[in-house]
Structures are given as C-alpha cells and as structure tokens.
Image: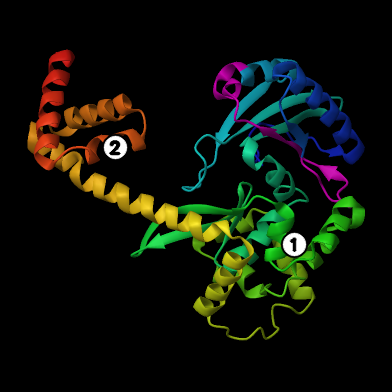
Amino acid sequence: MGGNAVLSTTRLTSSELMVLACRVQRALDAALPRAHRSEPVRFHGGKTSHGDLDVLLACDHATFENATFENALGVSLGATEMVVNHSKRLDADPNRKVLSYSVPTEAGAFQVDVVQVPESAFDFARWYFAFNDLGNLLGRVARRMGFKLSESGLRLEVDAAGERVGEVVVTRDWELALSFLGYDSQRYWKGAQGGFDSLESLFDFVSSSPYFDPGVFLPENRPNAARRRDAARPTYQAFLAWMEGQGLCSASWGNQDKELFRANALVRATDRFPRLSRDVCDLLDHHRRMKAVRARFNGRVVSDVTGLEGPELGAFLRERQAFFGSEEALAEWVEGLTDAELRSAVAEQASEWHGRSQ
C-alpha cells in the first residue's frame, strides 16, 4: 500500500511472510499502548510470493500523532529506512498515513507498510484491504450505484445546487455493505475462510452481483488519472484480462438509464439504512448554516471593516479561527450578533491583534 516507498527487491514466500508478521506484531506491542489494535492484511490462498507486508493499525490515540511512535517502531523492527506517506487523493483523510519500513530479513531488506486507519473504521478496513485489490474492484460496483466504498465504510456523496457538500456514512458493517451491493455475504465469508484460493476466485465473486457491469472497469470508460492508477495495479489488469477471457467485455449489458439506476439504489439505501435520510438532512442543514455564516464573516467582509489585506489579513483570520477553536464556536459567535455588532467586534479585535503583533 506504500508502493515502492523503500528500496527493496526481496520477495518472501507466504510462510516467510507470516514469520515476519509475527515479528512485526511483537514490535508493535513493544512500541504501542497495550490496548492498540493491529493485524496483517489478509491475502488469498493462491498467492505464494510477496513483495511487501501490509499491517493495519487503528490510530485514533494521540500517541500516533507524533514521530515518537514512528521512530520507536522503527527501532523495534531494526529498520534501516523509514518513509512516511500521505495519500495524494484530494478526498483522503489528512491524518491517515502509511509508514513504510525497510526491515532486514534472512532473504534481504523487505518493505513493511503500517497503514493507519481510524479506530471507528478498523473492522471495515480489515476486510476492504483484504485479498489483493478486491475492495477496489467492489468499489467500482458501488460507484456505478452512486455510492463510494473505501476503507472508512460505504459512503454517500451529497451535492446541493451543483456543489459537493460532503459525505455521510451509510454503513461501517462490511456484511451489510456487501449485501447492499448485491453480494452473497455467506459466499464471501466462505471465501475468506479459504475459498478465495486464486485471483480467479476473487474475480468470479466480483462479477456475481446483479449490479455488476464490466463497462465501468474498461479503460475507455475511466478518467485519465484513474487509468494511470489502474495501469499500475497488476490485479486490476489481471481482472480486465479475466473479463475478456470470460467474454464479459463483449456481452450486452443494456443501456440502463444511469440516473434512474442510481435513484433506485438510493431508495433501497434509505429503506435499508433508516439513519441515512436523517444524516443527509443534518449535513445539508449544516451546509446551509455555515454558508450563511461565511456570507457574514469572510475575508472580504473583514478586509472592508479593517483595511487588512494580503498576508496580514490571512494571519488575522487564522488567529480568529484558532481563538474560537472550532467551526461551531465561530458560527455561534457570528449568529449571536447583528451585522452592525459583528462589524464593530471585528474592528475591535483587529485593532487589538494589530497592537499585539507590533
């Protein structure tokens, strides 16, 4: 998951990898609080050669927010190199990191990736990341339905007036997510217990949903950036070849109306997950509220009142945000004042700030 973050061309057998996984677990136990949660990412039974070891780590505790833990783990592993990677996706959690270590083994230096995920999403992430790129392939089925499948859960992106408002969690129950996407969860668990013994067995499972459509996977139907990512994923390329061999790419799947298909999926979701409608309404209410707050308190308004511009304006706004500490506290302050009172308060605060900064 960390790519080729550290210099390592070593490959390990499955038995060698599991020996290393036990060693990594002992290192995590030594470097972390006793109550931490971590586990190696599962791989399918047919995979016999491995270029890295991925380990999931629940990371909400403050211990994980500084370099002390990262360095302590490196020492426990005897690592000769460490690289900290943040996801480059615009929608990624900024706190999520992948710690890549070069760990000496009898076969040579080997890459170990410690993937940090929120505690609240750990039970979902352990299955999303399992079995090569299975989670990514299932995510394409979810996307066709208008939903988003990631390590943090099955989510719904919410728009209003052509603007992306945010996302709401539909479920963080892996079995419920599979069922909603049209998959037989019992078949999945049988696969997880040993039935997934090859890439082909994984691919056959992906294609078993009634909502599966080969077209969403084909390069010509993918955005440029996605095509480049897909090209670097051996499992994804193997899936394309498997679909071609199964005659799926040339099959007629109809021209179902995309918006109608997604509308029907949304209706099913609101029926199956009763909290979804309320969570969407809460998100939209919050969006409208904050939009009204930002219309009254923003850089242009502050500049008009104070005369501050450029770096000074930015510094003052950052100081105000730090003072209130949260979006909610700032909103309550703005909402409690008339426009005249707000302008007067901003002018007074700017004067005090300017005096302190001299």
For label 1, the residue is: 238
SS label for mark 2: helix
- Return the residue nearer the eye: 179 or 358: 179
**Relative image position of residue 338 (x, y in whole percent):** 14, 40
Residue 96 seen from this side: yes
Q: Earlier in the sequence, mark 2 or mark 1?
A: 1
- Return the residue nearer the eye: 123 or 267: 267
**Relative image position of residue 127 (x, y in whole percent):** 74, 48
**Relative image position of residue 158 (x, y in whole percent):** 45, 59
For label 2, the residue is: 332
Q: Amino acid at mark 1?
A: Ala
Q: Amino acid at mark 2?
A: Glu
In the rendered structure, are the residues bearing label 2 and label 1 in contact, judged by CB atoms less than 8 Å apart? no
Q: Is residue 23 above or below residue 72?
A: below
Q: Residues within 10 Å of mark 2 (few under 14, many from 20)?
A: few
Whether residue 99 sits left or right of residue 301 in the image: it is right
Q: Which residues are magenta?
A: 41-68
Residue at 66 percent of width and 74 percent of height? 213
Q: Which quadrant of the structure image shows residue 337?
A: top left
- Return the residue nearer the eye: 104 or 22: 22
SS label for mark 1: helix
Q: Nearer the viewer, mark 2 or mark 1?
A: 2
Query: Which quadrant: the N terminus?
Result: top right
Residue 234 seen from this side: no
22 in the magenta segment: no
**Relative image position of residue 216 (x, y in whole percent):** 61, 70
- Return the residue nearer the eye: 229 or 273: 273
51 in the magenta segment: yes
